[in-house]
Image: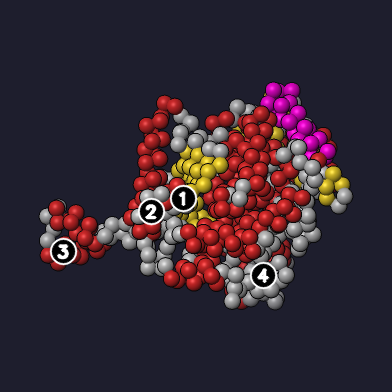
Amino acid sequence: MNRFDDLLSHAAATKDRQIRELFENDKRAAEFSAEFGEFLFDYSKTSIDETARDLLVALAERCGVAEKRAAMFAGAKINETENRAVLHTVWRNMAAEVSVDGRDVMPEVRATLGRMQAFAEAVRTGRFTGQGGAITDVVNIGIGGSDLGPAMATLALSSFADGPRCHFVSNVDGAHIHDTLAGLNPETTLVIVASKTFTTIETMTNAETARKWMAAKVATPAAQFAAISSAVDRTAAFGIDPSRVFGFEDWVGGRYSVWSPIGLSLMLAVGPGHFAEFHAGAAAMDRHFREAPLAENLPVLLALVGIWHNQVQGHATRAVLPYEQRLARLPAYLQQLEMESNGKRVSMDGADLPYNSGPVVWGEPGTNGQHAFYQLIHQGTRVIPCEFLVAATGREPDLEHQHLLLVANCLAQSEALLRGRSLAEATEILRKKGLTGAELERQARHRVFPGNRPSTTLLFNKLTPFTLGGIIALYEHRVFVEGVILGINSFDQWGVELGKELALALAPVLSGESDGAGKDGSTRALAARIRALREA
Ligand code: F6P
């Protein structure tokens, strides 16, 4: 017995039905889609029928989605394994009224946002300068949530960028910071050290490298550093003046932190006004999430479609396919958001999960992916549910003909996945080309598309700061709802700890200070080979 049993029975009973048969109901597209503002979420090209949807909505009700949603927005400590509230949403809603441990959190949030805006304006207008003139470049040093959010959003909104150029360094691989700094002038560069904990080894190592790079050219490197952290005491030890330190509380999870000071690089790039629109778009999605009935609620529907595909149908991965080049980093951003949040093996009370947790999320922008991995999506033996995102209008008025081609490709892919191409159709096409006999039969089989492959489409008008805010909030809440239904804690990340600890312990083995006693044979042999290669 598990919470998906009724859905599993329904899926088994309908398994031979083709998705395209569901379109015999000519109202299906309207009945199996939902709208909010400029967003249309079409999930009609999935095998979800009315019964499945009713069961899914009932599941969400039974699992307490509405109650847990209210608890999250009210500041309850729903991150039970870290004893923390989950309040990233207050950063995009200055009118929020929330207390944690009896303390109103808003005055500090408003004050810090005000300081961020003032600092961003000062940099953008040249009132704050480097030691060689106005700031031309910003280097954000951070990793995970302290990198992916601002990096993804800065690229997404590049058509709004009118501030300094922003660069993002995350990897401890020295190549990353080396190549980034190579083209920059230390005298006009601002370095932002972004780390919630201010202990992350990659970030602190890169920050040290950046400081040395700057010290070679400017008298006071610390004057061109800013810091973002929820551990502001540690930023002082790094020598960064408190006027350029922007704090946030530990109730903002790293992967949910783009709305907080972690978004400073984005604000520097597009300006506080556009950043406010980004906030407003997310706040509008928050209101929709809190108010719309579950069956018409976009984040809830995205989550339910996810549950249907992963826990019910058993599809282990989900492709995120933005037909929008500027959303190129969205799949990577969602990998952290979804996989760090819902990649858990025990329920909130510590018991082993009797079902799968969240899916593997991956993807690339269209149309590039079409010329790479779509082959497997169309004809491979595994079913990969696809999530298309597409804007009706492009941002380049002179290139609307290219945008139309892009949109046509997006719709063509979901149509092809749905309908496929039968053996009879493939045979007919080849017969017309002159093939006959055994060769016709053999060749035709390679040209069959099974079809019946599920996809959803999120359609919006145009990629603006407001729209992007809505998209990101939509995904955040989808992850929340999936987590509630799975009964897990979506807000901790203990699974990243073991590797970090072992990496620290391996450093002396690689340098030869330790013989690696107690390590497995493979790790010892690899370390020995690395030592030998480095010493040769
Ligand atoms: O390693 C996982 C993680 O803790 C993420 O959750 C987080 O986004 C990232 O590291 C960076 O952490 P910090 O912002 O504290 O440097």
Q: Residue at x 36, y 47 (%)?
A: 412
Q: Are the two marked residues, 1 and 2, in contact with CB atoms closer than 8 angstroms?
A: yes
Q: Residue at x 71, y 45 (%)?
A: 89
Please tell me which of labels 3 and 2 falls first in the chain. Answer: 2
Rendered view: 528 above or below 233: below
Identify which amino acid the numbered label 2 is placed on.
Asn
Identify which amino acid the numbered label 4 is placed on.
Val
Tell me if mark 1 has few (under 14), some (14-19) or many (20+) residues whose alpha carbon lies within 10 angstroms of its own: some
Rendered view: 183 above or below 364: above
Distance between the alpha carbons at the discs numbered 1 and 2: 9 Å
Residue picked out by circle 1: 31
Q: Residue 217, located in which quarter of the rendered image?
A: top right
Within the magenta stretch, is there residue 112? yes
Residue picked out by circle 4: 346
Distance between the alpha carbons at the discs numbered 3 and 2: 39 Å
Percent coordinates x, y for residue 233 in the rendering: 85, 46
Residue picked out by circle 2: 25
Tell me if mark 2 has few (under 14), some (14-19) or many (20+) residues whose alpha carbon lies within 10 angstroms of its own: few
Q: How many marks?
A: 4
Residue picked out by circle 3: 439
